[in-house]
Protein backbone atom coordinates (compact mmCIF):
# COMPACT_ATOMS: atom_id res chain seq x y z
CA UNK A 1 0.00 0.00 0.00
CA UNK A 2 1.31 3.45 -0.91
CA UNK A 3 2.06 5.35 2.30
CA UNK A 4 0.98 8.66 0.77
CA UNK A 5 -2.35 7.22 -0.31
CA UNK A 6 -2.77 5.54 3.07
CA UNK A 7 -2.43 8.99 4.65
CA UNK A 8 -5.07 10.21 2.20
CA UNK A 9 -7.46 7.56 3.48
CA UNK A 10 -6.73 8.53 7.09
CA UNK A 11 -7.77 12.10 6.30
CA UNK A 12 -10.83 10.99 4.35
CA UNK A 13 -11.84 8.57 7.09
CA UNK A 14 -11.56 11.39 9.64
CA UNK A 15 -14.09 13.42 7.65
CA UNK A 16 -16.44 10.45 7.21
CA UNK A 17 -16.34 9.69 10.94
CA UNK A 18 -16.91 13.34 11.81
CA UNK A 19 -19.91 13.42 9.44
CA UNK A 20 -21.27 10.36 11.29
CA UNK A 21 -21.84 8.45 8.04
CA UNK A 22 -20.91 5.15 6.47
CA UNK A 23 -18.65 5.20 3.42
CA UNK A 24 -21.57 4.57 1.04
CA UNK A 25 -23.78 7.14 2.77
CA UNK A 26 -20.97 9.70 2.58
CA UNK A 27 -20.42 8.97 -1.11
CA UNK A 28 -24.09 9.51 -1.94
CA UNK A 29 -24.18 12.66 0.19
CA UNK A 30 -21.37 14.31 -1.78
CA UNK A 31 -22.99 13.33 -5.07
CA UNK A 32 -21.09 10.23 -6.15
CA UNK A 33 -23.15 7.75 -8.15
CA UNK A 34 -20.95 4.96 -6.80
CA UNK A 35 -18.59 4.95 -3.82
CA UNK A 36 -15.92 2.91 -5.60
CA UNK A 37 -13.53 5.89 -5.65
CA UNK A 38 -13.66 6.06 -1.85
CA UNK A 39 -12.90 2.37 -1.48
CA UNK A 40 -9.98 2.74 -3.91
CA UNK A 41 -8.54 5.43 -1.66
CA UNK A 42 -9.06 3.13 1.32
CA UNK A 43 -7.14 0.39 -0.52
CA UNK A 44 -4.28 2.78 -1.24
CA UNK A 45 -4.82 2.72 -5.00
CA UNK A 46 -5.39 6.47 -5.32
CA UNK A 47 -5.05 9.67 -3.37
CA UNK A 48 -7.70 12.37 -2.92
CA UNK A 49 -8.21 14.20 -6.21
CA UNK A 50 -8.99 17.90 -6.45
CA UNK A 51 -12.42 17.04 -7.89
CA UNK A 52 -13.25 14.81 -4.91
CA UNK A 53 -11.93 17.38 -2.44
CA UNK A 54 -14.14 20.06 -4.01
CA UNK A 55 -17.18 17.79 -3.71
CA UNK A 56 -16.44 17.28 -0.03
CA UNK A 57 -15.95 20.95 0.87
CA UNK A 58 -19.07 21.94 -1.08
CA UNK A 59 -21.08 19.79 1.34
CA UNK A 60 -18.84 20.38 4.36
CA UNK A 61 -17.37 23.91 4.07
CA UNK A 62 -15.91 23.55 7.56
CA UNK A 63 -13.28 21.16 6.18
CA UNK A 64 -10.05 22.64 4.82
CA UNK A 65 -9.49 21.68 1.17
CA UNK A 66 -5.76 22.24 1.61
CA UNK A 67 -5.66 19.77 4.49
CA UNK A 68 -7.68 17.25 2.48
CA UNK A 69 -5.26 17.38 -0.44
CA UNK A 70 -1.92 17.68 1.37
CA UNK A 71 -2.42 16.92 5.06
CA UNK A 72 -0.91 20.30 5.95
CA UNK A 73 -2.65 22.48 8.51
CA UNK A 74 -5.79 21.54 10.42
CA UNK A 75 -8.84 19.60 9.30
CA UNK A 76 -11.12 22.55 10.09
CA UNK A 77 -8.72 25.40 9.37
CA UNK A 78 -7.61 27.97 11.90
CA UNK A 79 -11.04 29.31 12.80
CA UNK A 80 -13.51 26.53 13.61
CA UNK A 81 -17.07 27.30 12.58
CA UNK A 82 -19.49 27.66 15.48
CA UNK A 83 -23.20 27.46 14.72
CA UNK A 84 -25.89 28.84 16.99
CA UNK A 85 -28.78 26.39 16.77
CA UNK A 86 -32.23 27.11 18.26
CA UNK A 87 -33.15 24.43 20.81
CA UNK A 88 -36.84 23.68 21.37
CA UNK A 89 -38.07 21.87 24.46
CA UNK A 90 -41.17 19.77 23.91
CA UNK A 91 -42.62 16.74 22.19
CA UNK A 92 -41.80 16.61 18.49
CA UNK A 93 -44.60 14.07 18.08
CA UNK A 94 -47.01 17.00 18.05
CA UNK A 95 -45.41 18.32 14.87
CA UNK A 96 -42.23 20.18 14.06
CA UNK A 97 -43.95 23.40 13.00
CA UNK A 98 -46.01 23.40 16.19
CA UNK A 99 -42.84 22.85 18.20
CA UNK A 100 -40.97 25.72 16.56
CA UNK A 101 -44.01 27.98 16.63
CA UNK A 102 -42.95 29.24 20.04
CA UNK A 103 -39.73 30.75 21.24
CA UNK A 104 -36.72 28.43 21.51
CA UNK A 105 -35.70 27.58 25.04
CA UNK A 106 -32.15 28.64 24.20
CA UNK A 107 -29.56 28.62 21.43
CA UNK A 108 -26.83 25.97 21.45
CA UNK A 109 -23.44 27.14 20.21
CA UNK A 110 -21.98 24.02 18.58
CA UNK A 111 -18.52 24.04 16.97
CA UNK A 112 -17.96 22.24 13.67
CA UNK A 113 -21.64 21.48 13.16
CA UNK A 114 -23.08 21.03 9.69
CA UNK A 115 -25.74 23.60 8.81
CA UNK A 116 -29.05 22.79 10.52
CA UNK A 117 -32.36 24.44 11.37
CA UNK A 118 -33.21 23.35 14.89
CA UNK A 119 -32.50 21.01 17.77
CA UNK A 120 -34.86 19.08 20.03
CA UNK A 121 -34.66 16.47 22.78
CA UNK A 122 -35.65 12.99 21.60
CA UNK A 123 -38.27 11.09 23.58
CA UNK A 124 -38.60 8.26 21.03
CA UNK A 125 -37.43 4.87 22.32
CA UNK A 126 -37.67 3.23 18.88
CA UNK A 127 -34.11 4.25 17.91
CA UNK A 128 -32.52 3.26 21.23
CA UNK A 129 -29.68 2.55 21.88
CA UNK A 130 -28.44 4.39 18.77
CA UNK A 131 -30.28 7.53 19.84
CA UNK A 132 -31.26 7.31 23.49
CA UNK A 133 -34.19 9.10 25.07
CA UNK A 134 -32.93 12.51 26.17
CA UNK A 135 -30.42 12.85 23.33
CA UNK A 136 -30.42 16.27 21.66
CA UNK A 137 -30.96 15.81 17.92
CA UNK A 138 -30.02 18.41 15.29
CA UNK A 139 -32.21 18.65 12.18
CA UNK A 140 -32.02 20.14 8.68
CA UNK A 141 -35.21 20.49 6.63
CA UNK A 142 -35.08 19.00 3.14
CA UNK A 143 -37.25 17.52 0.41
CA UNK A 144 -38.40 13.92 0.32
CA UNK A 145 -36.60 13.46 -3.01
CA UNK A 146 -33.29 14.28 -1.31
CA UNK A 147 -33.47 11.35 1.13
CA UNK A 148 -30.26 9.32 1.17
CA UNK A 149 -31.02 5.63 1.83
CA UNK A 150 -29.83 4.50 5.24
CA UNK A 151 -29.85 7.96 6.79
CA UNK A 152 -31.66 9.08 9.93
CA UNK A 153 -34.66 11.34 9.40
CA UNK A 154 -37.62 12.85 11.19
CA UNK A 155 -40.62 12.02 9.01
CA UNK A 156 -43.73 14.19 9.32
CA UNK A 157 -47.04 12.70 8.16
CA UNK A 158 -50.63 13.72 8.81
CA UNK A 159 -51.08 11.52 11.90
CA UNK A 160 -47.57 11.13 13.29
CA UNK A 161 -44.04 12.50 13.50
CA UNK A 162 -41.30 9.91 13.99
CA UNK A 163 -37.53 9.54 13.99
CA UNK A 164 -36.44 6.58 11.87
CA UNK A 165 -33.73 5.21 9.59
CA UNK A 166 -35.13 5.43 6.06
CA UNK A 167 -34.69 2.99 3.17
CA UNK A 168 -36.05 3.47 -0.34
CA UNK A 169 -38.37 0.79 -1.69
CA UNK A 170 -39.78 0.28 -5.21
CA UNK A 171 -42.92 2.09 -6.36
CA UNK A 172 -42.25 5.23 -4.34
CA UNK A 173 -42.34 3.56 -0.94
CA UNK A 174 -40.22 4.37 2.11
CA UNK A 175 -39.26 1.78 4.70
CA UNK A 176 -38.96 3.31 8.17
CA UNK A 177 -36.67 1.16 10.30
CA UNK A 178 -36.25 1.06 14.05
CA UNK A 179 -33.30 -0.07 16.16
CA UNK A 180 -35.23 -1.16 19.24
CA UNK A 181 -36.63 -4.65 18.44
CA UNK A 182 -39.76 -3.98 20.48
CA UNK A 183 -40.85 -1.47 17.84
CA UNK A 184 -41.94 -2.54 14.36
CA UNK A 185 -40.60 -1.28 11.06
CA UNK A 186 -43.17 0.24 8.75
CA UNK A 187 -43.55 1.07 5.07
CA UNK A 188 -45.28 4.20 3.81
CA UNK A 189 -45.78 5.96 0.49
CA UNK A 190 -43.59 8.98 -0.19
CA UNK A 191 -46.82 10.82 -1.03
CA UNK A 192 -47.84 10.56 2.64
CA UNK A 193 -44.82 12.56 3.77
CA UNK A 194 -45.53 16.21 4.52
CA UNK A 195 -42.08 17.21 5.77
CA UNK A 196 -38.64 15.63 6.08
CA UNK A 197 -35.81 16.62 8.41
CA UNK A 198 -32.38 15.00 8.13
CA UNK A 199 -30.51 14.25 11.35
CA UNK A 200 -27.17 16.03 10.94
CA UNK A 201 -25.88 15.23 14.41
CA UNK A 202 -26.79 14.39 17.98
CA UNK A 203 -25.55 15.28 21.43
CA UNK A 204 -25.79 12.58 24.07
CA UNK A 205 -26.24 13.79 27.63
CA UNK A 206 -25.13 11.58 30.49
Image (cartoon, grey):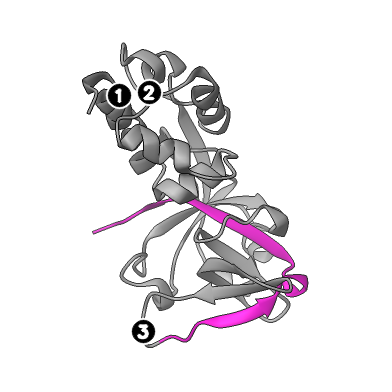
Secondary structure category for the residue under label 3: loop
Secondary structure category for the residue under label 1: helix
Using the image as rendered, state which of residue 23 and residue 33 is in the foreground: 33
Residue 194 relative to residue 63: left or right: right
Q: Are marks 1 and 2 in contact (CB under 8 Å)?
A: yes
Secondary structure category for the residue under label 2: loop
Q: Residue at x 69, y 81 (%)?
A: 159
Residue 165 relative to residue 17: left or right: right
Q: Residue at x 67, y 65 (%)?
A: 98
Q: CA distance from mark 3 to mark 2?
A: 41 Å
Quadrant of the image occupied by residue 16 = top left
Using the rendered image of the protein, determine whether residue 79 is visible from the camera's viewpoint.
Answer: no
For the record, the magenta segment spans 183-206
Q: Earlier in the sequence, mark 1 or mark 2?
A: 1
> Image quadrant for the C terminus?
bottom left
Residue 80 relative to residue 32: left or right: left
Q: Point out residue 66 in the picture as x, y percentages from the top left corner.
A: 42, 13
**Residue carrying label 3:** 181
Q: Are marks 3 and 1 in contact (CB under 8 Å)?
A: no
Any mark on residue 47, and which? 2
Q: Earlier in the sequence, mark 3 or mark 1?
A: 1
Using the image as rendered, state which of residue 76 and residue 106 is in the foreground: 76
Any mark on residue 5, and which? 1
Q: Residues within 10 Å of mark 3 (few under 14, many from 20)?
A: few
Q: Residue at x 47, y 86 (%)?
A: 184
Q: CA distance from mark 1 to mark 2?
A: 5 Å
115 falls in the magenta region: no
Q: CA distance from mark 3 to mark 1?
A: 41 Å
Q: Residue at x 75, y 75 (%)?
A: 192
Q: Residues within 10 Å of mark 2 (few under 14, many from 20)?
A: many
Using the rendered image of the protein, determine whether residue 4 is visible from the camera's viewpoint.
Answer: yes
| For residue 112, above or below residue 176 | above
Amino acid sequence: MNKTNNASWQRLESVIRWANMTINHFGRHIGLIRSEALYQIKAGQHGISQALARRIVEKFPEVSIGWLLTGEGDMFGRQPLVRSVPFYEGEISGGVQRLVGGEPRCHLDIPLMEECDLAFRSSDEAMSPEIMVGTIVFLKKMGVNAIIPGGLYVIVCANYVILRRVRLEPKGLLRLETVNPTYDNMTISADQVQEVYRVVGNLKLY
